[in-house]
Image (cartoon, rainbow, N blue to C red):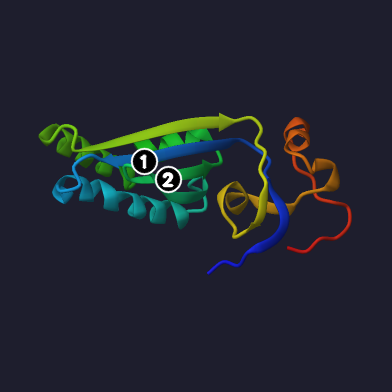
């Protein structure tokens, strides 16, 4: 189990950053035969991506929304995200085909959604939390004095570590 990181932390990351939100909405809970296959497909995809350092997946955070599971993923490039989604040899493509077949048999029983963001700059703050979110997917660093405020971190466009040694 992860330990709580004391102090004010942020993230550091250089390069293209894609934030991908994806989820499913279970509209007929009493029909697991319709939503269960889609539900169990995502862990297999995450495992496949996590063991491949060239996949482009930097990390993810699993949440539970009002209608079902919700996943925030961090990717190193939009091209790697699209390459994974369209590769028939990977888990996503067959899972997507199976979902579409099931959706045609029982329209409205389960929904899926996603949003993709190509991020030019990102600001974050994590105070006394376990590693999570963007810093867990990239690099966790202490907040420097000159970047104490969100406005300063965002305006600067990058996160810098204090000159004095800090331990995490």
Residue at image mark 1:
23
Q: Circle 2 — which element?
A: strand
The residue drawn where x is 75% and y is 42% is: 159
Q: Please report contact status of discs 2 and 1: CB closer than 8 Å, yes or no.
A: yes
| Residue 138, horizontal then vertical, whole percent | 62, 49
Q: Earlier in the sequence, mark 2 or mark 1?
A: 1
The residue drawn where x is 21% and y is 35% is: 100
In which quadrant is the C terminus drawn?
bottom right
Residue at image mark 2:
71
Relative to 76, 166 lies left or right: right
Q: Circle 1 — which element?
A: strand
Relative to 29, 91 lies left or right: right
Q: Is residue 80 visible?
A: no
Pointer 2 local density, CA inside 10 Å: few below 14, some 14–19, many at least 20: some
Q: In the rendered image, which quarter is residue 13 located in?
A: top right
Residue farthest toward the bottom in the current orientation of the protein: 1
| Residue 5, horizontal then vertical, whole percent | 67, 62
């Amino acid at each position: 189990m992860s330990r709580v990181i004391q102090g004010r932390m942020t993230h550091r990351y250089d390069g293209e950053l894609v934030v991908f939100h994806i989820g499913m909405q279970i509209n007929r809970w009493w029909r697991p035969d319709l939503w269960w296959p889609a539900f169990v497909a995502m862990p297999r995809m995450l495992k496949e991506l996590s063991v491949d350092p060239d996949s482009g997946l930097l990390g993810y955070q699993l949440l539970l929304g009002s209608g079902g599971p919700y996943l925030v993923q961090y990717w190193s490039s939009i091209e790697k995200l699209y390459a994974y989604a369209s590769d028939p040899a990977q888990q996503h493509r067959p899972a997507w085909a199976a979902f579409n077949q099931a959706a045609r048999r029982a329209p409205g029983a389960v929904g899926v959604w996603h949003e993709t963001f190509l991020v030019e700059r990102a600001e974050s703050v994590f105070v006394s939390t376990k590693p999570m979110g963007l810093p867990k997917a990239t690099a966790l660093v202490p907040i420097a004095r000159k970047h104490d405020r969100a406005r300063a971190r965002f305006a600067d466009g990058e996160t810098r570590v204090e000159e004095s040694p800090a331990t995490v």
